[in-house]
Image (tube, rainbow, N blue to C red):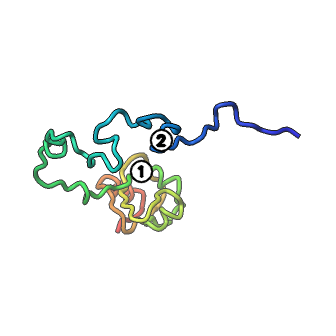
Amino acid sequence: MGQINAPFGANTKKTIVGRGASSKGRACGRGHDGQNSRSGGGVRLGFEGGQMPLYRRIARRGFSNYPFKVTYTAISLSVLDAAYADGETVSLETLKEKGLVKGKDVQVKILNNGEVTKKLAIEGIKVSQSAKEAVEKAGGSVK
């Protein structure tokens, strides 16, 4: 029965520093003297040796609305035409059931890309003006 062995040099012993000359030599891989060579030594995150840190040099003014931005998932009329049967209702729940949108807090907007040939009833979803006209022209409705 064959044994699988790791190639030579793949498994090396962990280096334990700061335990005398037998472990890894005098400085133990921390360089020669200085703040970072000492136990407990080191500087805080963003510290640049007394130079004005980057996070204080860069101006930060005003208000950003980015965290509150609402993004919509765009769905084409051609996608709805392929996924839905004649007379079906298009809502956020049915879109999720058919796997056209995913996520908990998803926002959807229907755009006029392609053609719609079926009577579809769209409820509770944002629809572009041209898509609304195309759906109503095909005999559907938008609420």
- The residue lying at 36 percent from left, 61 percent from top is 107
Residue 103 is left or right of residue 66, and the answer is right
Where does the N terminus fall, quadrant-wise? top right
Of tags 1 and 2, which is closer to the observer?
2
Q: Within the image, what quadrant is residue 72 found in?
A: bottom left
Q: In this view, does 10 lie above or below 89?
A: above
Q: Within the image, what quadrant is residue 26 found in?
A: top left
125 and 8: which is toward the camera: 8
Q: Are marks 1 and 2 in contact (CB under 8 Å)?
A: no
User: Mark 1 sits on what residue?
Assistant: 76
Residue 96 at x, y percent in the picture: 49, 63
Q: Is residue 102 above or below residue 17?
A: below
89 and 63: which is toward the camera: 63
Instruction: Name the residue at the top extreme.
Output: 8
Instruction: Name the residue at the front extreme.
Output: 21
Sequence order check, earlier mark of 1 and 2: 2
User: Mark 2 sits on what residue?
Assistant: 20
- The residue lying at 20 percent from left, 39 percent from top is 49
- The residue lying at 53 percent from left, 60 percent from top is 98
Residue 117 at x, y percent in the picture: 47, 53
Q: Kindly state the secondary structure of the residue where label 2 is placed.
A: loop
50 and 128: which is toward the camera: 50
Q: Spatial distance from mark 1 to mark 2, Cα to Cα?
A: 69 Å
- The residue lying at 24 percent from left, 45 percent from top is 46
Q: Kindly state the secondary structure of the residue where label 1 is placed.
A: strand
